[in-house]
Amino acid sequence: MEDSGAEGEPRSPRLVRRKTVLRAALAATAAIPVSLIGGPALARTLAAGGTAPALTPPCDDGDDPTPEQIEGPYFKPRSPERTSLLEPGLPGIPLTVTGYVFGRACLPLAGVLLDFWQADDKGAYDNTGFRLRGHQYTDSRGSFALTTIVPGLYPGRTRHLHVKVQAPSRPVLTTQLYFPNEPRNNTDTIFDPRLLMTVRDAGGGREAAFDFVLDVPQNPGPGPDPTPSGDTWAAGVTYRAGDLVTYASRAYTCLQPHTAQPGWEPPTVPALWRAV
């Protein structure tokens, strides 16, 4: 069972360079905050050998949209609305995928439709029912979370997830998400490294993270002045890299430009803030 176009399918001319947004490396010795466990991931996990990978490019105005990819022959409309695709007796390695959906100005998008479908652990798609198919919507923070299994392999393709992403009243982005360090990534003719998830082993399963950038115009407003050193952190304030704030009587320096939101307090997001 092979996606149409897997062999000899030219890459879409609309594919554009994608920047990973609001993800930075955790320090090699940093613990993952309890507030992020099971929630959207703002940080890359440690690379093999325990060293932290380099910082990813910051999200900025005009960030490049996530590349599109072919739909393949197995999409089915009208999937059930659900965040978990697990069913009783379904074999496979548990997988959780979390992330955010942003527009062109790096502002999160609420109410975005994400429709996922995938093969089972043997590489087969359910074409009669809706096993391993489902849709959901981003929350008010622009975040999503999918509970499923690691998809199996089938001839001609590497391991992947399918997804359609649509902001309200905007065009649909159809694309695929990939797993790092898969041998078939080197032979799959439509594999795109810009669509690699960040994946780690966790508790007998795997946790993955990916942030989408949709071609949705946004007006971030006038550029902010640098935050004065020593200001108390506050939600709704736009911070620049290097800004200094205090939170709970402790000083932090901003690592990446962003607009602060509830839940992104400095102690809970080491991807954005470092204690000084």
Image (tube, rainbow, N blue to C red):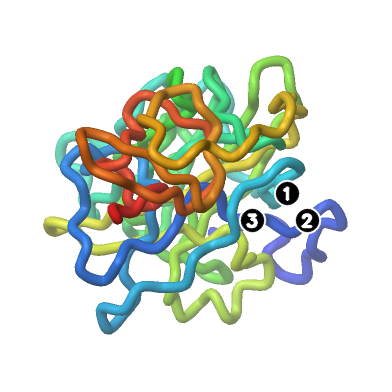
> What amino acid type is highlighted by mark number 1?
Asp
**The quadrant where residue 199 appears:** bottom left
Relative side of 64 to 39, left or right: right
Q: Which of pointers 2 and 1 lies earlier in the amino acid sequence?
A: 2
Image coordinates of residue 110 in percent, x first then y, are: 53, 20
Tag 1–tag 3 contact (CB < 8 Å): yes
Q: Amino acid at mark 2?
A: Val
Q: Residues within 10 Å of mark 2 (few under 14, many from 20)?
A: few
Look at discs 2 and 1 and give the one toward the viewer. 1
Report the residue marked by disc 1: 64
- Which residue sits at x=49%, y=22%? 236
Q: CA distance from mark 2 to mark 3?
A: 10 Å
Residue drawn where x is 52% and y is 45% of the image: 211
Name the mark on residue 267. Answer: none
Q: Are marks 2 and 1 in contact (CB under 8 Å)?
A: yes
Tell me what residue is drawn at x 32 percent, y 29 percent.
263
The Cα–Cα distance between marks 2 and 1, rounded to whole angstroms, is 7 Å
The picture places residue 16, in percent across and down from the top left corner, at 78, 56
Residue marked by disc 3: 19
- Closer to the camera in the image, 116 or 77: 116
Q: What is the three-letter code of the residue carrying label 3?
A: Lys
Residue 252 visible here: yes
Crowdedness near tag 1: few (<14), some (14–19) or many (≥20) residues, C-alpha within 10 Å: many
User: Regarding mark 2 in the picture, which secondary structure is present there?
Assistant: loop
Question: As rendered, which of 155 and 100 lies closer to the eye?
Answer: 100
Q: At numbered mark 1, what does the secondary structure look like: helix, strand or loop?
A: loop
Residue at the right extreme of this rendering: 13
Is 187 on the left or on the right of 128, as rendered? right
Which residue is the site of mark 2?
Answer: 16
